[in-house]
Amino acid sequence: MGQDAAAKHADDSVTSDVGLLRIDHVGVAVADLDEAVEFYTRVFGMTCVHIEENTDQGVREAMMSVGPTTEGGCVQLLAPLSPASAIAKFLDRSGPGVQQVAYTVRDVEVAAAVLRDRGMRLLYDAPRRGTAGSRINFVHPKDAGGVLVELVEPPR
Ligand code: V0V
């Protein structure tokens, strides 16, 4: 991107009305979280910056920082807590691999409203709790070219 384009892009007045700010993380479904954390650390040299259990989402997850800081983006490793979990279903159907792409948004309710207006099905009527107190919603993969899109509003 040229300097002018980069400057324009950084200007709030011309960024998307959905309020996308950056790629927050890429979510990868795994069967065993501890094994996957060990693999991403040993093979790719990523750093585990956060681990939590989210019973609402049926997952145990680890946020892996790609670069020296999370500004370089993260891979979120997702393991199912039970056979009913969305991750268990994904593993059954597709095996381990990329399950979602997540974007940081300025305001998840605004992003969801704009996307609904554009005919996207949002999975939740209201945002739910995501990693580390974030607020999240998802666009159905069938409306987004086969990609489960997560919207993440970081905690304030
Ligand atoms: C299903 N499909 C997918 C998909 N999951 N396509 C791409 N990526 C995925 N992840 C396809 C599937 O192959 C079917 O295609 C079609 O969608 C409908 O399938 P379905 O039987 O309705 O699928 P289900 O029952 O597995 O449900 C899919 C949805 C479910 C997306 C509705 O996974 C869900 O509610 N996900 C949102 C919650 C979530 O993923 N939580 C875990 C991450 P055909 O066969 O019809 O062509 S938690 C998280 O990210 C956190 C905590 C965080 O970031 O903070």
Image (cartoon, grey):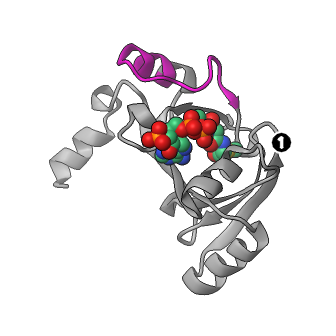
Tell me if 1 is positioned left or right of 118 in this view.
left
Residue at 67 percent of width and 34 percent of height: 156
Horizontal and vertical percent position of residue 155: 68, 37
Q: Is residue 59 magenta?
A: no
**Amino acid type of the residue that numbered disc 1 sits on in the rendered structure:** Thr
Q: Which residue is mark 1?
A: 55
Tell me if 51 is positioned left or right of 108 in this view.
right
Q: Is residue 57 visible?
A: yes
Q: Is residue 122 magenta?
A: yes
In this rendering, the answer to whether 5 lies above or below 30 is above
Closer to the camera in the image, 19 or 39: 39
Closer to the camera in the image, 132 or 156: 132
In this rendering, the answer to whether 130 lies above or below 81 is above
Which of the image's four quarters has the N terminus? bottom left
Horizontal and vertical percent position of residue 143: 40, 31
Q: Residues within 10 Å of mark 1 (few under 14, many from 20)?
A: few
Q: Identify the magenta region.
A: 111-128
Horizontal and vertical percent position of residue 8: 23, 39
In this rendering, the answer to whether 8 lies above or below 94 is above
